[in-house]
Amino acid sequence: MNRFSVSATENYPEWSLLLTWVAVVEAASVSGAARLLGLSQAAVSQRIKQLEAAMSTELLDRSTRPARPTPAGELLFEHAARLLAQAGDMTESVRNLSRAKRNIVRFGCVDSFAGTLGPTLIHGLSGASRQIRLWSGITPVLDKQLEDRQLDLVVTTSAATGKPGIRKTSLFSEPYVLVVPRTMDMDRITTLKELGKRAQFIRYSARSFIGAEIDRLVEAHDVMIERTFEFDNTDPLLSLVTAGLGFGISTPLCVWQSRHFVDQLRVLPLAPFLGMARSDDASLSRSFYLAARPQEVGKLPTEARDVILVAMERLVHKDIAPALGLPPATLWRSLRR
């Protein structure tokens, strides 16, 4: 059969009927589907009958209570759900292509990246032929926005990929560091457990990706410290540390994002306080990844990665390392392969 002939397309069910059927199956009832669609139950029932007529088969077994899909109905649901999802992707892809021709790029990144490397990224990628719009947020939200095509590229700290077609490229890693008040005497404190007995642990909230990762790291070394203060952002965390209310675990970029506190802090490698000789252990660091749909943004991810790595190296050597009093090589590592 010629799928482009008028007679062939007349046999295709309407999209509204397929959408109704998917709603009925997902809601497990006609009444539930009616609520989802904002229709009356009678209207939903009528659409099902129209779809059954178009498909020349029963889709709903009305002998049961509640009515259940027949095998043919289950099969139609699988195909219809897939078609509707593909239709949504098609629409967004076409819109994104139109946006690309207007050279507007929506770039999302975690807060610590936006506040430190964001300006350099904008300068490096913007130009007469391209406009960068920068968003910041937490990793789970950014990943979801990329999946939903609300963003074109994102820099996050999770290696996990979502929908097919999204590719994540490793950028760089930075170590977790111990942050204490500059006035705190650390001469006799050699372990995190000892420090936890003498000062309160001011931590990132477990709601944040960095907070959850630090919690796992600390627990993996059998260090149990009572929860007292928790924050989603670095600024209030370091504010309490500088006030002498406790200590924290952070990263060089996070500390630099709140660099107005640096003069009142001591930043120390975390590894020795966990009894580890090497500070470059992967478990003691967080990594950054650039995620995008390459087929939709072309060479932009490669351009962005190059700009980011050059900017990070310059930032660490010129600003962060001198301010924290630590060797540049201990504060970051490129993951370019």
Image: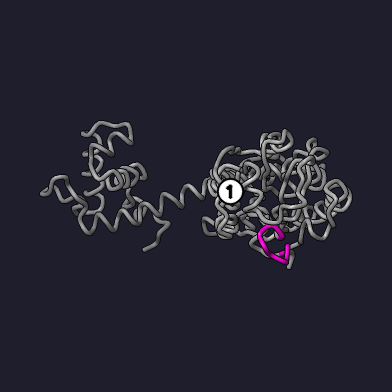
Q: Is residue 279 magenta?
A: yes
Name which residue lies at 63% across and 44% down.
98
Residue lying at the far front in this picture: please name it: 188
User: Which quadrant of the structure image shows residue 141?
Assistant: top right
Q: Is residue 194 magenta?
A: no
**Counting other residues with Cα less than 10 Å from the Cα at mark 1, is it few (<14), some (14-19), or many (20 or more)?**
some
Residue lying at the far left in this picture: please name it: 63
- Percent from the top left, x then y, of residue 326? 83, 54
Q: How is the image coloured?
A: one colour
- Magenta stretch in the rendered image: 272-280
User: Which quadrant of the structure image shows residue 199?
Assistant: top right
Q: Quadrant of the C terminus?
A: bottom right
Magenta segment, principal secondary structure?
A: loop
- Percent from the top left, x then y, of residue 334? 76, 61
Please, what secondary structure does the residue beneath circle 1 have? helix
User: Which quadrant of the structure image shows residue 310?
Assistant: bottom right
Q: Can you say whether 46 is above or below 309 in the image?
A: above
Q: Which amino acid type corresponds to the residue marked 1 in the rendered image?
A: Phe
Name which residue lies at 59% across and 55% down.
218
- Percent from the top left, x then y, of residue 11? 31, 52
Q: Which residue is mark 1?
A: 209
Name which residue lies at 62% across and 53% down.
193
Drawn side of residue 81 relative to residue 265, left or right? left
Name which residue lies at 59% across and 37% down.
229
